[in-house]
Amino acid sequence: MSVLTVVKLQGDTAAFQKALANRAEEFEAISERAKTKGAIHHRFGIGDGFVQVVDEWETPEQFQSFFGDPALQEFITSAGGNPSAPDITISEAISSPDQF
């Protein structure tokens, strides 16, 4: 069974949105690398001073290995995020009759 991961990073959301627009190829390359490491679904959200990442992974270990990569941590910083103290929640993904 897969897991859902929710990561909340403090950061500069304007810088992050600019990075999404100006560095799309880098984001796409990271996405492809994540898929080879066990990522199933991926989505970003932004709020007041934070970026949220909502993913589905095959296992918690695959997520942790991917997220802990120093190159990814550097990229996050360069895109306006602060990966030093993320709020990470990992839960077992379950099916429900109302899911869509």
Image (cartoon, rainbow, N blue to C red):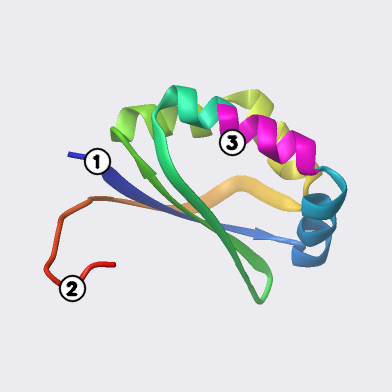
Disc 3 to disc 1, how far (Cα)? 18 Å
Q: Which one is closest to the eye, mark 1 or mark 2?
A: 2
Circle 1/circle 2 CB separation < 8 Å:
no
Question: Could you say whether the residue bearing mark 3 is in a helix, strand or loop?
Answer: helix
Is 30 within the magenta? Answer: yes
State the residue position of label 1: 2
Instruction: Please report the bounds of the magenta region as a residue range.
Output: 24-32
Q: In the image, is 97 to the left or to the right of 54?
A: left
User: Which is more toward the observer, 85 or 74?
Assistant: 74
Mark 3 packing: few (<14 Cα in 10 Å), some, or many (20+)? some
Above or below, 7 relative to 61: below
Q: In the image, is 43 to the left or to the right of 2?
A: right
Q: Earlier in the sequence, mark 3 or mark 1?
A: 1
Above or below, 41 relative to 60: below
Q: Amino acid at mark 1?
A: Ser
State the residue position of label 3: 31
Above or below, 14 relative to 57: below
Circle 3/circle 1 CB separation < 8 Å:
no
Q: In the image, is 59 to the left or to the right of 1?
A: right
Q: Which one is closest to the eye, mark 3 or mark 2?
A: 2
Disc 1 to disc 2, how far (Cα)? 18 Å
Q: Quick check: can you spot residue 38? A: yes
Q: Quick check: can you spot residue 68? A: no
Percent of width and height locating residue 91: 25, 51
Percent of width and height locating residue 2: 24, 41
Q: Which image quarter holds the C terminus?
A: bottom left
Magenta region, main secondary structure: helix
Q: Amino acid at mark 2?
A: Asp
State the residue position of label 2: 98
User: Which is more toward the observer, 63 or 25?
Assistant: 25
Q: Quadrant of residue 31?
A: top right
